[in-house]
Amino acid sequence: MPREHHPDGYRTHARRPIGKRNPEARTDDYDEIWKPDWSPEALQDQGERCVDCGVPTCMSGCPIGNRIPEWNDLVHRSDWKDALAQLHATNNFPEFTGYTCPAPCEDACVLAVNDDAVAIKSIERAIVDKGWEEGWIQPEPPAERTDHRVAIVGSGPAGLAAAQQLNRAGHRVTVYERDDAVGGLMTYGIPDFKFARHRVERRVTQLREEGIQFVMDTEVGTDLTPDQLRAGHDAVCLAIGAQQPRELPVPGTDLDGVMPAMEYLPQENRRRRGQSVPGGVTAKNKNVVVLGGGDTGADCVATAHRQGAEQVVQIGINQQGPSDRPADNPWPQAAQVYEKTYAQQEGGTEEFAVHTQALEDLDGDGHVDELRAERVEWTYENGRRADKTVLNPDLRIPADLVLVAIGFTGPQGNPLASLGVERAEDGTFATDDRLMTDVDGVFAAGDARMGASLVVWAIGEGRDAARQIDRYLTGTSDLPASLQTPNPPLG
Ligand SMILES: Cc1cc2nc3c(=O)[nH]c(=O)nc-3n(C[C@H](O)[C@H](O)[C@H](O)COP(=O)(O)OP(=O)(O)OC[C@H]3O[C@@H](n4cnc5c(N)ncnc54)[C@H](O)[C@@H]3O)c2cc1C
Ligand code: SF4
């Protein structure tokens, strides 16, 4: 039954996002941390909190320009099916974002100036959850096929979004993936308890039924030469991510028990898929140190807790962020404030302003035993660490397992180097504003082009690359642009 809209709904209803399961209970299993159930009526009330402010800053806060006010209103009116159509108009995989996005849209919501933002991410999740439950999400193969063949290299969110868009434009799309499963970091990286495997798998089923071909266990540049790839396709999109880990520049990183986060996390993804992991490492009964404070560090902390770690200490090099927005980070920018991560809510210790000096093997058995560091206080210039005062020069933390999650330096290798594809100084693939590399017909998108970023940006980049590839192949394109990615609307 449609309901009347109250423009002051935000006064009637408090913000109530869907929320997470009890932190103490959830570390006993690998089920998703998110509450599985939500009530349609409660979410309709949340939709009513949208003030339809006229200048939807939330949409500019969302990298793909999701039509947030539209679907807030449709949800409020209980028109879930139209809300789903509006959501899919800008986002191929709204559950990828509805579960994992840090929701910069909410920081930019007009209500967030002096009240609690609309629970946008929860509404997005609810719409797409309902879409799957009701069977509204079905394959949409194109009515007609062109003769153009496109290769997508990499099956993360950027590659999958590009593939779906190009396939819907009628082109013949093949996705090449070096791993044994589709999904990029959504499958091997992000833990199953943050994003369940079946959510990627049912999208892959949809994509296959739409006519997209997947070639797995095939590393472009090794298993398939660049010349073979080019010979079989009219255009190529490099969507290989930016998974090269940043190295920790201190002595002791070659000791046993020290490993990059992206060696550790996929091992657990594989165990969850029922695969054996010969030589794999777990945190059981160990003193674990996680270096790095981002999403990857948090996922390591949470995984170590589920594996039965004795103790988990997460170390950040920077000072702890402020709890309120600083003056140089005003609304509607994404708020640079400290918030306890889901992983820290589950337990462990978090240390800030700790400058690692060495990893030590105290008994000479070749295995790490201790992390040595300075506790410091940093001063910053233009947001970068400039100078430090050492408060404690000899901080020692016991460590049987050190997980290094201090960021990524860019794509792993350059599979199309022999064709002349160049990388920029920062290691990413340089493109022009059509997302084309310096080689005609070779495009790049997602983390491979931007550097390590977010799922929502990867989807937006994949959509934009698809639109540019479509135009490259046919001279024009009806595929839509993403709002914030670098493609201006077609002239
Ligand atoms: C642990 C972790 C947690 C994260 N959590 C979040 C989060 O909560 N929210 C969020 O928004 N973002 C998160 N991110 C970031 C997000 O996962 C990435 O920004 C996003 O996956 C990038 O998508 P992509 O398609 O560009 O690349 P990827 O997802 O990295 O996919 C690239 C794919 O290319 C394949 N590939 C590479 N080289 C080749 C080759 N030569 N031939 C064939 N295939 C190749 C790779 O195997 C991979 O499957 C997280 C990242 C990590 C590492
Ligand atoms: S994709 Fe992210 S930023 Fe965009 S509406 Fe969803 S939660 Fe907000």
Image (cartoon, rainbow, N blue to C red):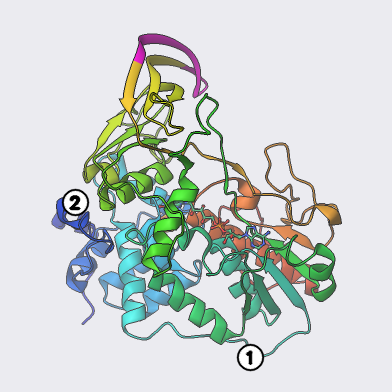
* In the depicted structure, whether residue 94 falls above or below residue 299: below
Q: Of residues 472 and 342, which is closer to you in this image?
A: 342
Quarter occupied by residue 46 = bottom left
Q: Which residue is mark 2?
A: 23
Q: Quadrant of the C terminus?
A: bottom right
- Proximity of marks 1 and 2: CB atoms separated by less than 8 Å: no
First in sequence: mark 1 or mark 2? Answer: 2
Quarter occupied by residue 156 = bottom right
Which stretch is magenta?
380-394
* In the depicted structure, whether residue 13 falls above or below residue 351: below
Judged from the image, the secondary structure of the residue bearing numbered disc 2 is helix
Three-letter amino acid code at disc 2?
A: Pro
Q: Quadrant of the N terminus?
A: bottom left
Judged from the image, the secondary structure of the residue bearing numbered disc 1 is loop
For the residue with label 1, is its CB less than 8 Å from the closest atom of ligand 1?
A: no
Q: Position of residue 167 (x, y in %)?
A: 64, 79
Which residue is drawn at the image coordinates 38% and 15% (left, top)?
Answer: 376
67 to the left or right of 33: right
Give the numbered dot on residue 67: none
Q: Of residues 93 and 187, which is closer to you in this image?
A: 187
Three-letter amino acid code at disc 1?
A: Ala
Q: For mark 2, does the 10 Å Cα neighbourhood hold few (<14), some (14 to 19), or many (20 or more) residues?
A: some
Quarter occupied by residue 118 = bottom left
467 to the left or right of 299: right
Q: Which residue is mark 1?
A: 143
Which residue is drawn at the image coordinates 52% and 31% (left, top)?
Answer: 248
The reply to whether the magenta stretch includes residue 381 is: yes
